[in-house]
Amino acid sequence: MSMHPKKRTGLGAIIAALCIVIYLFALVQAAVRIYFNIEENRSAAEQEFSKITAAALLSGRYGFMDERFISAMNNALAASNVIEALIVTGPEGEYAFERQQGHAVTWVNNSPRFINKLGFSNQGYYNTLPINDLRNANIKAVAGAYNYSEIQKILKETLLLILIGFALAFFTMLIQILIGKPEGEKLAAGVNERTTSAYLNEPQKLSNIPETPAHESASGPAPKGLYSPRSDIGWEEYIIDRLDSELHRCASTENDLTLILMEFADLTNDTMFKQAAAEAVSFFSSRDLLFEYGKYGIAVILPGLDLETGISKSEKFHQRVMVKFPNSAYTASNFNIGLSSRSGRLLSAERLMLESREALSKSKHDQKTSIIAFQSDLEKYRAFIASQS
């Protein structure tokens, strides 16, 4: 047998917590740095606008909107890093100055207007121009909200921190998988080597168990139609025929097949069982390959999947049930799973059912695991079958 322990090692939890801290730190530092960048940009815009206003006052004394004034405005705007455009208003109309033509100013009825863009600051910059005897002379400006080069730097460094977290999680998972696999024998991830070896060396134990169901089927009407009205999945009486058919098909194409048996020991009525069956259909995505098993159990046939993949899917479904049925969250041992696979063998549906039932029975009596898989050694199995001939 191969066993999946209920409790994860502390290393995984520590690494997971560390990764969460890294992600949170990356996001928080990015938010703080972007906020300060916006504030610095705003302060720089105010200083630049004050200098531009002073240049406008100085040049305006010698002539408003003459060539000298226009040149002074263009030079002041070009020297700025944050101010994007200016609108100068005088007695004879409004005049626009831009660092990049058409980027920040649009014209409406022959009047310039600042374009409302996401990258521009929402703070307005405005000053009057007390130049000689001019009336209604003023200057307005729009500034960029961010320093784009600094924002790019912040985002790159934030991405680097997140990638470090991902790399840490990936290599930790890889190391756990490599450490968890014993030398000289390929086992599914998370299995217990001692228990696996004990059962692989004694295949004859199963041969002495009568190949009849280890429990009575749920009482009810005789099968009628494809699906049982109690659960909306296949009748239990159809398991062997369908399993035998799938085994023959997988053997002809040299594909694997995994059979999963699960029991919900803490369900109390058919309504809850029907909900559990619906979750299984939603997760395994093939109603035709799901069947009732006992009073509150489900059998799942997974053609084309090996035992390791079957264990992985069983783990994910077990976690899903713990979330969907909170009454089971504190008694995970009351939802048990046993599974076995074809593993390259030519075997009957009854034999595969027998192995999965034995695995399920062990999981119900084991205090350390809710999921047990029967994993056969192909050479030993062939030798055992030959000895029985």
Image: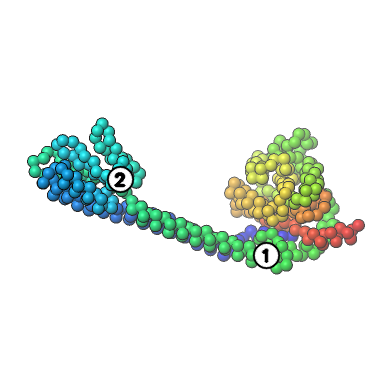
Amino acid on which disc 1 is placed: Lys
Q: Nearer the viewer, residue 311 or 34?
A: 34
Q: Residue at x 19, y 47 (%)?
A: 71
Pick whichever, 302 or 82, lies toward us.
82
Q: Are marks 2 and 1 in contact (CB under 8 Å)?
A: no
Q: Residue at x 66, y 45 (%)?
A: 284
Front-lying residue, 161 or 137: 137
Give left or right: position of 257 versus 14: right
Q: Nearer the viewer, mark 2 or mark 1?
A: 2
Residue occupied by mark 1:
181
| Residue 137 to residue 147: above or below | above
Q: Is residue 194 visible?
A: no
Residue wearing tag 2: 100
Residue 311 falls in image quadrant: bottom right
From the top left corner, tell me how far across and down residue 118 is, in percent. Answer: 35, 44
Helix, strand, or loop for circle 2?
loop
Question: Mark 2 is on which residue type?
Answer: Gln
Instruction: Answer with mark 2 or mark 1, whichever residue precedes in sequence.
Output: 2
Asked whether, in this view, residue 369 is left or right of residue 132, the answer is right
Q: Residue furthest right?
A: 389
